Amino acid sequence: MTKIESHSPFVSSEVETRRAKPTSLDCAREERGGDVRTDWTREEIAALFDLPFADLLYEAQTVHRAHHPRNEVQLSTLLSIKTGGCVEDCGYCNQSAHAETGLKATKLMDPRAVLQAAAQAKDAGSTRFCMGAAWRSPKDRDMPAIIEMVKGVRAMGMETCMTLGMLSAEQSKQLAEAGLDYYNHNIDTSPENYANVITTRTFEDRIETLENVRGAGINVCCGGIVGMGEKREDRIGFLHALATMPHPESVPINALVPVKGTVLGDMLADTPLAKIDEIEFVRTVAAARIVMPKSMVRLSAGRESMSEACQALCFMAGANSIFTGDKLLTTANAGDDKDAALFAKLGVLAMQPAPHGHLEAAE
């Protein structure tokens, strides 16, 4: 790494000392030329967060271009196939039975209705169709309908993704045999902060499901939520947990949507913590791209409250997937028209699927 010389009186001796030492930029550059690392330390990830913002974005975009098509973003659609009534007490979720949001619980959708929604999503340009059910875990009696949905969506040439709560090894095997491409199961936050957000299951429970999914040969979609009142140390710990496991093929980064009646929505209401600082959010996306260079990094919940500039910086930082449409499960989302207008401004193209239903590899 070439040392940048500076004689400016505005550059402190501390900054010059930092420049003279090997940094996480050096580690990331070594990463581009070698194997994907799963031995990142918290100190290295913290150093990424501490980089000057422009340096961090430059490095993240450089890593991104080494592994992904530039100026292309995957469009995904998320449908709630079973809403509300979940027995878990996730503090961010308005579908929890513990929340008092007035949300009415529903039964599992008919597979035909799900496939109709998938066809509409494909017509709107989505290449991945994600289906979410508000369960602690699916019951065996629900599996035939779930499998029918997976097979039907996959037959349309779209990537399939499910999030159904915790899975057993046998259920994971059934979904794999049906052709499920991805299973979403977020770790949400750092291991240390997890019990502050959820008490009805443990961080280790989450990891067990991820292991069951991987063991069945299904790609993992795993990320978390920023803006739950956590500290930067928790955002570092969250990325460290992801970067030191087999890297998820897809990493959704959500910004908390504080819903009145949820634990976190009520706790953060009318406080500065109710909205994540956009620069800090972009830093999180950039650090995720650097430490997990081959993963798809998705801007998920919370985009409807982000400025266009923030979203543009996230794409520069290496985000290359979004949920499109007017709704994410039960909360509002930036619509198709807004996304198309933003893409046109930025010169960003929607990523196209290959004939077999999986995304084309980077040239």
Image: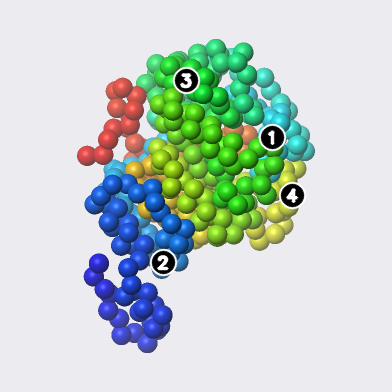
Residue type for callout 2: Leu
Do callouts 4 and 2 mark residues in contact (Cβ within 8 Å)? no
- Dot 2 or dot 1: first in sequence order is 2
Q: Is the residue under label 1 in contact with that under label 2 (CB below 8 Å)?
A: no
Q: Nearer the viewer, mark 1 or mark 3?
A: 3
Q: Secondary structure at mark 3?
A: helix
Q: Position of residue 289 (x, y in %)?
A: 39, 50
Kindly report which numbered mark, 3 or 2, lies closer to the viewer in this rendering. Answer: 3
Q: CA distance from mark 4 to mark 3?
A: 39 Å
Question: In the shown orientation, is residue 106 left or right of residue 56?
Answer: right
- Image quadrant holding the C terminus, namely top left
Asked if residue 164 shows in the view, the reply is yes
Q: Which numbered dot is residue 173? A: 3
Mark 3 and mark 2 lie on one chain; the one further toward the N terminus is 2
Crowd band around label 4 with a 10 angstrom C-alpha radius: few (<14), some (14–19), many (20+) = some
Q: Is residue 315 left or right of residue 195?
A: left
Q: Residues within 10 Å of mark 3 (few under 14, many from 20)?
A: many
> Which residue is labeled 2 in the image?
51
Give whichever of discs 4 and 3 has the lower sequence position.
Answer: 3
Locate residue 22 relative to residue 269 in the image: left or right.
left
Q: Which residue is mark 1?
A: 88
Determine which of the numbered discs, if any, sits on residue 266 in the image. 4
Q: Residue at x 37, y 59 (%)?
A: 57
**Viewer-nearest of labels 2 and 1?**
1
Residue under the image location 69 percent in, 42 percent down: 199
Q: Earlier in the sequence, mark 4 or mark 2?
A: 2
In this view, the mark in front (4 or 3): 3
Upstream in sequence: badge 1 or badge 3: 1
